[in-house]
Image (tube, rainbow, N blue to C red):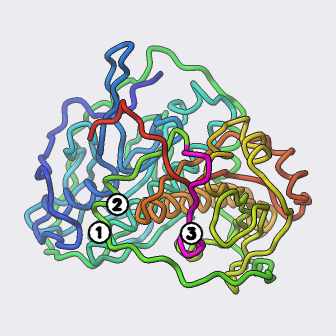
Amino acid sequence: MPDPFRHYEGVPVLDLPADPPAPDKPGTDGAAFLSQLLFYSAAISATKLVPSSGLRYALRVNPSSGNLHPTEFHFITRGLNNWPDGLYHYRPSSHMAEQRATGEFRIVGSDAPLVFIFTSIAWREEWKYRDRAYRYCLHDIGHAWQALALAAEAMGCDSKAIVDFPDDEIARALRLNEDEWPMLILAVSGIARKSDAGETVWYGGQANPLSQETIAYPRIDAIHAATKVIVNSAVEPAPTGSGEIKLPPPAQSTRSFGNVVRSRRSALDFVGGTRSMTLPQLSAVLEAARPLLSFVQLYLYVHRVDGLEPGVYRFWLQDAELQLVKAGDQRVAAAGLSLGQDLAGNACVAFSMIGDLDRAARAHGDRGYRYVFFEAGAIGHRLYLAAEALGLGATGIGAFYDEEVHRYLHVAPEQGQVVYHFAIGYPVPDPRLQA
């Protein structure tokens, strides 16, 4: 297993204030602002202790496949109060900012005071998941994107995702290690700022080696190379339709954003039996996903939702309605399709996200492949937070039998491919967890 934490040796490390206040009270000082933003989007939030070995490992605010965290957070600051302009790398292991360079940086034409560049280290996933790892890296970027964007929104800021940038040019500009690929840029605006940028000065610094040896995965390298090409044309409208079941108004939560994101965990399993979620809770979960649904269609395996018969349902975005696709108990099917994982059957509801890869490719070329998986990960993150806010638990499921899912849901090749599974229910307590 490679080191889950990257750091740069020989560069200045700037403190971010510990225990920052809730993000609904943003600080105007640069260090305080950055501390809040990262504490509620990317920081360590808990640890787990393995009794048999005594090993303790960290969990973070942003979820990750296998808790392997291929995503790194680099950021450029421009005019933050009492904070030097320059290029930084976030070090979550100690909640600090590594100062890689000072001065003026401009990439992709953004003049926002704060620009994040999410990068992916595929080897962190490849060593365990092999060729399938590229999907998980893309999911991870989607989760990180929404984690940061929602934290910025809670702090009264706007953010804009930039995905069509020249990969190699950005990698060179940031002097990224060769094992690290830029994937998504998020420009954050609406921050108190000054203007006194100076000449760029690099501090050097070498990225720490993550493993003593690595194994090449040429298929992943080929996929990534193919998706570097930028193509932009008109996006065809998504298919429209309606269902027979109109959803009720969404359930509401009184929990604060900060409390929700710091408490969110990935459930290892769910309490089965008779404990159900309500239809308004399901409505709230689906409402959280709606703003991001573009290339992804949601199918639901409903097990225990009060007021809704067990079965497979399709969610129609336009009218927020459900269409019954297959009636009857779906617990065995959901678990079986999810690589035999019981949690998909023990949940109250499980999801198949079907991505319209062909429509994405027509609009964006092969690069559209990335965008579909980004969207699926971003939707997953919103499902996580909605479930947590409502007193439920959730987990993303990247392992499933692709072709069997297509056959079971009667999804034809031109309708899309399954890109992500997800489950929501009442989580089984994990005694290893320590806040």
Q: Amino acid at mark 2?
A: Val
In the displayed structure image, the side of residue 171 where residue 83 appears, left or right = left
In the displayed structure image, the side of residue 131 where residue 167 appears, left or right = left
Q: Quadrant of the C terminus?
A: top left
The answer to if 89 sits in the magenta stretch is no
Q: Position of residue 260 (x, y in %)?
A: 34, 60
Q: Which mark is residue 95?
A: none
Q: Position of residue 169 (x, y in %)?
A: 49, 52
The region drawn magenta spans 270-283
Q: Position of residue 48 (x, y in %)?
A: 34, 31
Question: Where is residue 21, by image quadrant?
Answer: bottom left
Answer whether labels 1 and 2 touch (C-beta < 8 Å). yes
Q: CA distance from mark 1 to mark 2?
A: 6 Å
Answer whether labels 1 and 3 touch (C-beta < 8 Å). no
Q: CA distance from mark 1 to mark 3?
A: 21 Å
Find numbered disc 2 in the image and state the secondary structure of the residue it sits on: helix
- Depth check, front residue: 180 or 94: 94
Residue at left offset 66%, top offset 60%: 372
Residue at left offset 73%, top offset 67%: 297
- Depth check, front residue: 368 or 250: 250
Q: Amino acid at mark 1?
A: Ser
Q: Which mark is residue 256?
A: 1
Query: Which residue carries the number 2 mark?
Result: 260
137 vs 164: above or below: above
Q: Position of residue 130 (x, y in %)?
A: 65, 28
Question: Where is residue 220, by image quadrant?
Answer: top right
Query: Which residue carries the number 3 mark?
Result: 278
- Depth check, front residue: 372 or 98: 372
Q: Nearer the viewer, mark 3 or mark 2?
A: 3
